[in-house]
Image: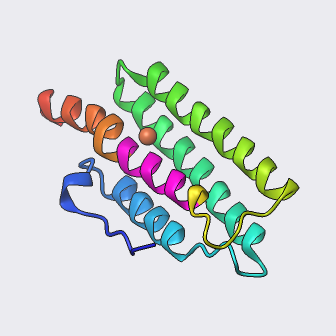
Amino acid sequence: MPIIAWTEAMSVGNAALDKDHQKLIGMINDLDQSAPDFLELFNAVLDYTNGHFDREETHLEAIGFPGLDAHRVQHDDFADQVADMLKQFRAQPFDPADTRLKDFLWSWLKGHILIEDQRYAAWTRAKGG
Ligand SMILES: [Fe+2]
């Protein structure tokens, strides 16, 4: 799995949230499902992700972003999908060549940052913030 890099196109115009996204991308890049402590590392990613979602939602609430409810649904939906995948992994660890877990994390996060998070970034810019 190639190393994925944060790019300017992912910036949401908020330094703390950009930093969160950079950290998450780094954590996902470092995930290795063949590592003996994989589940621990994976849980650390989930913890960080949940903390990030809270920080992001708090920010969106503070700025009065009108799409907050829909955005929260996206976050909750991701949490459900990851919990489901984790259940599958615990029941039967995926083969090291089976990259669906990391592919899912990465494609979701990338799509979310580039599309969904850009909605509040654009909204903030439009109102002069
Ligand atoms: Fe988000």
Q: Nearer the viewer, residue 51 or 76?
A: 76
Q: Is residue 118 above or below residue 19?
A: above
Say if 51 sits above or below 102 in the image: above
Residue 77 rendering spot, x and y as whole percentages: 59, 31
**Residue ID at (22%, 33%):** 124
What x and y, as percent, mark residue 21? 41, 58
Residue 32 lies in quadrant: bottom right
Magenta-colored stretch includes residue 108: yes
Dividing the image into four equal quarters, which quarter contains ligand 1? top left
User: Any magenta on residue 69?
Assistant: no
The image's colour scheme reads: rainbow
Q: What predominant SS class does the magenta segment belong to? A: helix
Comparing 10 with 32, the one in front is 32
| Vertical arrangement, residue 120 with respect to residue 33, above or below | above
Residue 96 screen position, x and y as percent: 66, 73
Q: Is residue 62 above or below residue 1?
A: above
Within the image, what quadrant is residue 118 found in?
top left
Is 119 left or right of 60, judged from the image as shown?
A: left
Q: Count the numbered circles shown.
A: 0
Where residue 22 appears, x then y in whole percent?
39, 65
Q: Residue furthest right?
A: 91
- Seen at 72% across and 61% down, the residue is 43
Question: Nearest the camera: 80 or 103?
Answer: 103
Image: magenta residue range: 102-112
Q: Answer left or right for 77 relative to 70.
A: right
